[in-house]
Image (cartoon, rainbow, N blue to C red):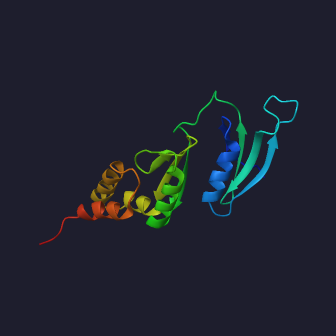
Amino acid sequence: MTAITPCLWFDDRLEEAAEFYTAIFPNSSIGHLARYGEAGPGQPGTVMAGEFTLDGTTFRAINGGPMFAFSEAVSFSISCTGQAEVDYYWDSLVDGGEESMCGWLKDRFGLSWQIVPTRLHELLFDPDPARATAAQQAMLAMRRLVIADLEAAADAAVPTSH
């Protein structure tokens, strides 16, 4: 069976990134790390390449140098069941990084993440287009997604009967 494994290109912080990510996600571990020997081209003992697993998903990574950087063109999305989970992943991953909009952030290594409550998808696909539009507009104004605020926006779109 064919497996598709994300491969990440770090400048020289692969080992630090693997330690950071595996401390955040459950069921995670650092696999083999290949280190440069005397033949180089890197400093002997420094990490050249390796693997780590985040909540059951294996990632490969290399310390390839500064010529390529992460961009928002590729991101990892985390589906969260509630606000506590949204807050945990947001706070953990944004530490040393930067917030963006609509549930997106960049971590300290420049990798983009989407921290998305499953409730957002339910609201965006609400059969009532006014509720879906209101939830979408609320999402577009947020950095960290707040489920209660998304729900309040959707609920406010429903006209009250007198």
122 relative position to 109: left or right: left
- Splitting the image into 4 quarters, where does residue 62 fall? top right
Q: Quadrant of the C terminus?
A: bottom left
Residue 100: image x %, image y %? 43, 44
Residue 119: image x %, image y %? 42, 63
Residue at horizontal 76 percent and vertical 41 percent from the top: 49
94 relative position to 7: left or right: left
Residue at horizontal 58 percent and vertical 42 percent from the top: 109
- Splitting the image into 4 quarters, where does residue 128 fall? bottom left
How many numbered discs, if any? 0
Residue farthest to the left?
162
Note whether residue 82 is visible: no
- In depth, the one of 120 and 59 nearer the eye is 59
Residue 148: image x %, image y %? 35, 65
Vertical arrangement, residue 69 with respect to residue 79, above or below: above
63 relative position to 68: left or right: right
Residue farthest to the bottom?
162
- Splitting the image into 4 quarters, where does residue 26 fall? bottom right
- In depth, the one of 73 and 62 nearer the eye is 62
Residue 160: image x %, image y %? 17, 68
Residue at horizontal 65 percent and vertical 47 percent from the top: 17
Note whether residue 123 is visible: yes
- In depth, the one of 101 and 126 nearer the eye is 101
